[in-house]
Image: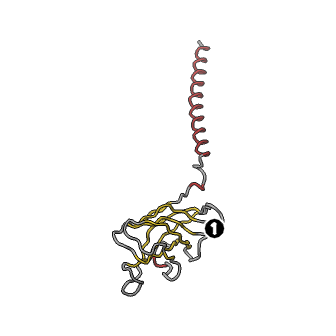
């Protein structure tokens, strides 16, 4: 009787250890796979993303080590935009934006009609006004894309003033 009781306890203990052993093995394999896939790597935490404002399109974003952001711009505001110029800055509000004579870059397409898209290359600036650059690949930059434009197809003037709009917020890592 004593031996039978001891056997049952041993069998129960073995079943307990085997059940938890298999569960721990499965968890260890799953964590190993996640590690191999790079889920725990800090460099995978930031991906290039662009969140555009209503009426604007920002896709296919990349950032060079020289601090030049390349993206596909488009607009669906229902109007035509003229005299386009772009800038990229770490500033979220327009109060400290570079003026049109400074750091805005003339667009390859000076006029953009509704639903038209094209690629833009523009240097990015830090919140202190210095041009961003990093020799370390994977360096993160969070910024905002801005445009200056006019509503009439004429040079900017008092009757055709520059209008400024924040078109997107983005996060990117430098790539080669």
* Image quarter of the N terminus: top right
Task: Give me the residue at 36% from left, 80% from top.
Answer: 152
Task: Give me the residue at 38% from left, 80% from top.
Answer: 153
Front residue of this view, candidates 153 and 4: 153
Estimate the x, y position of residue 73 in percent, counting from the top left. Answer: 45, 66
Mark 1, residues whose alpha carbon is within 10 Å: few (<14), some, or many (≥20)? some
Residue found farthest to the top: 1
In this picture, is 72 found above or below 7? below
Task: Tell whether 103 sits left or right of 115.
Answer: right
What color scheme is it? secondary structure
Estimate the x, y position of residue 30 in percent, counting from the top left. Answer: 57, 40
Element class at badge 1: loop
Picture quadrant of residue 138:
bottom right
Front residue of this view, candidates 13 and 154: 154
In this picture, is 164 found above or below 114? below
In this picture, is 156 found above or below 63? below
Q: How many marks on residues? A: 1
Estimate the x, y position of residue 23 in percent, counting from the top left. Answer: 56, 33
Estimate the x, y position of residue 140 in percent, counting from the top left. Answer: 58, 63
Task: Tell whether 34 sits left or right of 60.
Answer: right
Residue found farthest to the right: 135
Front residue of this view, candidates 91 and 20: 91
* Image quarter of the C terminus: bottom right
Residue with the mark numbered 1: 134
Task: Give me the residue at 41% from left, 71% from top.
Answer: 112
């Amino acid at each position: 009787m004593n031996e039978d009781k001891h056997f049952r306890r041993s069998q129960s203990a073995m079943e307990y250890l085997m059940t938890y052993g298999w569960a721990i093995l499965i968890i260890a394999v799953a964590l190993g796979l996640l590690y191999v896939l790079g889920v725990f790597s800090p460099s995978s935490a930031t991906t290039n993303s662009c969140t555009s404002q209503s009426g604007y399109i920002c896709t296919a974003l990349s950032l060079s080590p020289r601090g030049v952001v390349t993206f596909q711009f488009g607009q669906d505001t229902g109007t035509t935009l003229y005299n386009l110029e772009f800038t990229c800055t770490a500033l979220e509000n327009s109060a400290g934006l570079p003026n049109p004579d400074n750091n805005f870059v003339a667009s390859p397409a000076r006029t953009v009609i509704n639903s038209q898209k094209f690629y833009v290359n523009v240097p990015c600036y830090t919140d202190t006004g210095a041009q961003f650059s990093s020799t370390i690949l994977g360096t993160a930059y969070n910024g905002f894309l801005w445009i200056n434009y006019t509503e009439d197809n004429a040079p900017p003037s008092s009757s055709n003033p520059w209008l400024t709009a924040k078109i997107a917020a983005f996060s990117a890592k430098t790539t080669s």
